[in-house]
């Protein structure tokens, strides 16, 4: 009977120790959502057009002391253009106390969408840069990012006379839940 009690107490101690050790890991896994507003410019043979735009997205990533890496899906909506983009982002963070500035770069693909007049969007490479601040919520496993971002993609659709590039820039809020 004493051996069983010692075994149960040992197992319980190991389980509780493993659970609290998870809080002290050197990395955090997170999932989140983004929303932003800004503008998009289509560059098409000296006929540039700029309109208001919105952005919505989802992220899944890993946060380590000086760097952060994430996979991201974006839906970019503008008057004449709707884009779906998949991106891989890398960030460099400057650790501070409650607010942490960061700088990021991303690369990925425009996965599809449509333009005005029923034109389909081509699959093409896309690049983005981000500059922002992370706000740590003290007691909750939540972080809030406020960032400025610009995304560029070349030749997003092709017509016989035009192959426009797009530059989408916005201010975003990102809510991240730390697992």
Image (cartoon, rainbow, N blue to C red):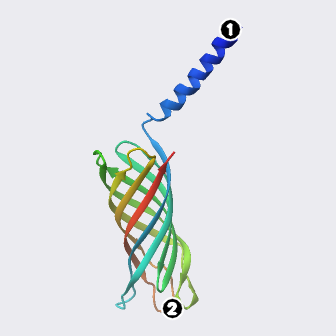
Other-residue count near label 2 (Cα within 10 Å), few / some / many at <14 / 14–19 / ≥20: few
Please report the residue visible at 54 percent of the width from the left and 28 percent of the height from the top. Answer: 18
Please report the residue visible at 49 percent of the width from the left and 34 percent of the height from the top. Answer: 22
Label 1: state its secondary structure.
Answer: helix
Position of residue 48 measured from the top left corner of the image (x, y, whole percent) = 36, 88
Please report the residue visible at 48 percent of the width from the left and 78 percent of the height from the top. Answer: 77
Q: Nearer the viewer, residue 175 or 60?
A: 175
Q: How many marks?
A: 2
104 on left or right of 83: left
Instruction: Give the number of the disc on residue 3.
Output: 1
Q: Quadrant of the N terminus?
A: top right
Q: Looking at the image, can residue 42 be seen?
A: no
Residue for badge 2:
160
109 on left or right of 52: right
Q: Nearer the viewer, residue 162 or 8?
A: 8
Q: Nearer the viewer, residue 135 or 120?
A: 135
Instruction: Give the number of the disc on residue 50.
Output: none
Q: Looking at the image, can residue 84 be seen?
A: yes
Residue contact at pointers 1 and 2, CB within 8 angstroms = no
Label 2: state its secondary structure.
Answer: loop
Other-residue count near label 1 (Cα within 10 Å), few / some / many at <14 / 14–19 / ≥20: few
Position of residue 61 measured from the top left corner of the image (x, y, whole percent) = 48, 51
Position of residue 28 measured from the top left corner of the image (x, y, whole percent) = 46, 43
* Residue situated furthest right in the rendering: 1
Task: Using the image, determine if residue 94 lies above or below residue 175.
Answer: above
Q: Nearer the viewer, residue 18 or 127?
A: 18
- The image quadrant of residue 129 is bottom left
Please report the residue visible at 46 percent of the width from the left and 35 percent of the height from the top. Answer: 23
Position of residue 99 measured from the top left corner of the image (x, y, whole percent) = 30, 51
Gap between marks 1 and 2 measured at Cα: 82 Å
Q: Nearer the viewer, mark 1 or mark 2?
A: 1
Quick one: label 1 or label 2, which is nearer the N terminus? Answer: 1
């Amino acid at each position: 009977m004493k051996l069983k009690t010692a075994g149960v107490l040992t197992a319980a101690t190991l389980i509780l120790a493993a659970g609290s050790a998870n809080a002290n890991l050197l990395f955090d896994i997170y999932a989140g959502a983004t929303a932003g507003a800004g503008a998009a410019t289509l560059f098409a043979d000296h006929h540039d057009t700029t309109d208001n735009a919105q952005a919505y997205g989802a992220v899944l990533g890993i946060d380590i002391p000086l760097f952060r890496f994430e996979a991201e899906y974006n839906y970019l909506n503008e008057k004449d253009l709707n884009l779906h983009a998949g991106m891989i982002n890398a960030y460099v963070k400057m650790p501070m106390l409650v607010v942490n500035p960061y700088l990021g770069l991303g690369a990925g693909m425009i996965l599809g969408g449509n333009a005005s007049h029923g034109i389909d969007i081509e699959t093409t490479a896309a690049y983005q840069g981000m500059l922002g601040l992370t706000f740590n919520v003290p007691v909750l496993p939540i972080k809030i990012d406020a960032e400025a971002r610009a995304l560029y993609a070349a030749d997003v659709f092709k017509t016989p006379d035009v192959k426009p590039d797009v530059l989408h820039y916005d201010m975003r809020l990102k809510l991240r839940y730390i697992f």
